[in-house]
Image: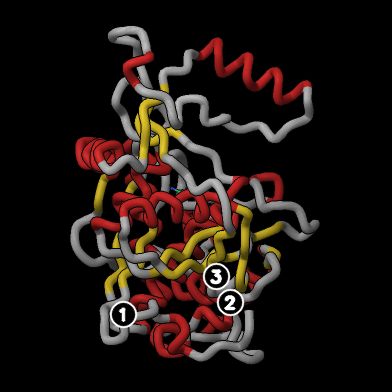
Amino acid sequence: MSASGEKSDLPAGASGGQVVTRFAPSPTGFLHIGGARTAMFNWLFARHHGGKALLRIEDTDKARSTPEAIDAIFAGLDWLGLDWDDTPVFQSERAARHAEVAHQLLNMGKAYKCFATAEELEAMRAEQREKKLPMRYDGRWRDRDPSEAPAGAPYVVRLKAPQSGKMTIADQVQGNVTVDTRELDDYVLLRSDGTPTYMLAVVVDDHDMGVTHIIRGDDHLNNAFRQLALIQAMGWPEPVYAHIPLIHGNDGAKLSKRHGALGVEAYRDDMGVVSDAMFNYLLRLGWGYGDREKISRAEAVELFSLANVGKSPSRFDAKKLINLNGQYLREMDDTALAALVA
Ligand code: GLU
């Protein structure tokens, strides 16, 4: 990205409008290092601009979401000193609203009912595999009349994605990213049991929560284009995107447990890492201000900007974290230190 100033961080046409960010974890495990950093960047950006930082628990995958994971996420965020505005949104409670938007799109002719059976779709995929064609839904019900379907047959609702042209996202970290819209398929919004897909839920929730800036891991960059197609179909304002590079281990591979990457609470409980040190370490992992290593929360709020988020993956280094923690511990007064040990 070009070295843009602070102003470009703000949504076009929203000058004077309030910045609203969100952290949207799926509660399928503890708050890991990557999630914690994403949460921090959202929080810092909102606080820097005097806006709102919102929290949304994406608990639609009932089989994998657990109350323990939700508690661990809340506890981890709390420990890092990240407070959130408004009450947290639980995505699973909003299914009716998600379905409502799918039906609105149907009525507007921007979505359609697809009656293709599982066997039919499997045959379609097998053919695509064989012919080495891109694997995607071929739009077979896009222009067909629903009356051609057998009476009472189950259907899914699919988005009528744009079929030609290009789509560009002016990502605040990645720069301009363009895709050919032919690469976007008519993906499913509502399943045949009427439940919303993840893609629909995210877009509707971000819109209803008034989110202006979506700051998240770059593993979601591909999703952004599909989500944008839905936002455009609804005629909703487009958010500003910032996809931050994932954290890697010291060997350059995507960070995992193998690298000793744990939930944030493990660093607190097992390694005696203090909150300020963890905050400082995660801040510097992917964001920089000159060569400053030690930065307090208050300074971070003052200095944070998306323009200073690095474009390449950062490497998690537990030794560096422990080292920084040592500096914080040495500066603590006796009372605070005693409380910590207790
Ligand atoms: N729930 C998603 C995750 O935990 C994040 C979705 C998003 O930020 O849009 O990866």
Category of crowding for the residue at label 3, using alpha-carbon neighbours closer than 10 angstroms: few (below 14), some (14–19), many (at least 20): some
Q: Which residue is mark 1?
A: 14
Q: Which residue is mark 2?
A: 309
Q: Residue at x 66, y 32 (%)?
A: 135
Label disc, if present, on residue 171 of the rendered structure: 3
Q: Residue at x 37, y 13 (%)?
A: 149
Which amino acid is tagged 3?
A: Asp
Q: Earlier in the sequence, mark 2 or mark 1?
A: 1
Q: Secondary structure at mark 1?
A: loop
User: How far apart are the two marked residues, 1 and 3, measured between alpha carbons?
Assistant: 17 Å
Q: Quadrant of residue 145?
A: top left
Is residue 118 something that shows in the picture?
A: yes
Label disc, if present, on residue 292 of the rendered structure: none
Q: Secondary structure at mark 3?
A: strand
In the rendered structure, are the residues bearing label 1 and label 3 in contact, judged by CB atoms less than 8 Å apart?
Answer: no
The N terminus sits in image quarter? bottom right
Which amino acid is tagged 2?
A: Val
| Mark 1 residue CB less than 8 A from any atom of ligand 1 | no
Q: Earlier in the sequence, mark 1 or mark 3?
A: 1
User: How far apart are the two marked residues, 2 and 1, measured between alpha carbons?
Assistant: 22 Å
| Residue 11, horizontal then vertical, whole percent | 38, 77
> Disc 2 or disc 3, which is closer to the eye?
3
